[in-house]
Amino acid sequence: MTQPLVKKTTEIAGPICIPSIWESAATMPALEPKDVLAIMDVGHYAESQASQFNSLPRPATVLVKDGQAELIKRAETVEDVFATQILPERFKKAKAEIAKKKTAKA
């Protein structure tokens, strides 16, 4: 760590809606939004448990050894999450019909 530890209580939690508190009453450096933390034991956030629950993109995977960190899997984007989904043709037609009716009313 390159920053001094702060004396206030810090709670570190995951971004999903199920209880996922990694640490309560932790002593941490001062953190800012978008700071990156390395958490070694992550439970359901581990690579083997990763999912797109609630359409959240999966995080990057970093290999760390002997003080060296290497990105081995990039973080997903929202576009990645939805890239494999296909809108059936009947829904596209229904959407076009709704738009047509709205235009006719105007």
Image (tube, rainbow, N blue to C red):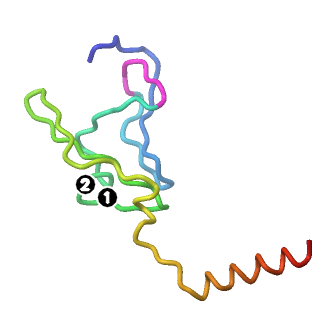
Residue pictured at 36% horizontal, 41% vertical: 22
Residue pictured at 46% horizontal, 18% vertical: 8
Q: Where is residue 103? Give x, y as percent.
A: 84, 74
**Which stretch appears magenta?**
26-33
Give the class, few, some or many, for how many residues have Cα within 10 Å of label 1's Cα (few <14, many ≥20): few
- The residue that label 1 is drawn on is 50
Q: Amino acid at mark 1?
A: Ala
Q: Where is residue 37? Give x, y as percent.
A: 33, 32
**Image position of 89 (left or right of 4):** right
C-alpha distance separating marks 1 and 2: 5 Å
Please name whichever residue, 43 or 103, is drawn nearer the observer in this view of the structure: 103
Assign the N terminus to one quadrant of the image: top left
Q: Where is residue 82? Give x, y as percent.
A: 45, 65
Vertical order, 3 against 91 (above or below):
above
Give the class, few, some or many, for how many residues have Cα within 10 Å of label 2's Cα (few <14, many ≥20): few
Vertical order, 79 against 4 (above or below):
below
Assign the C terminus to one quadrant of the image: bottom right
- The residue that label 2 is drawn on is 47
Secondary structure mostly seen in the magenta stretch: loop
Vertical order, 42 against 28 (above or below):
below
Q: Quick check: marks 1 and 2 in contact, CB under 8 Å?
A: yes
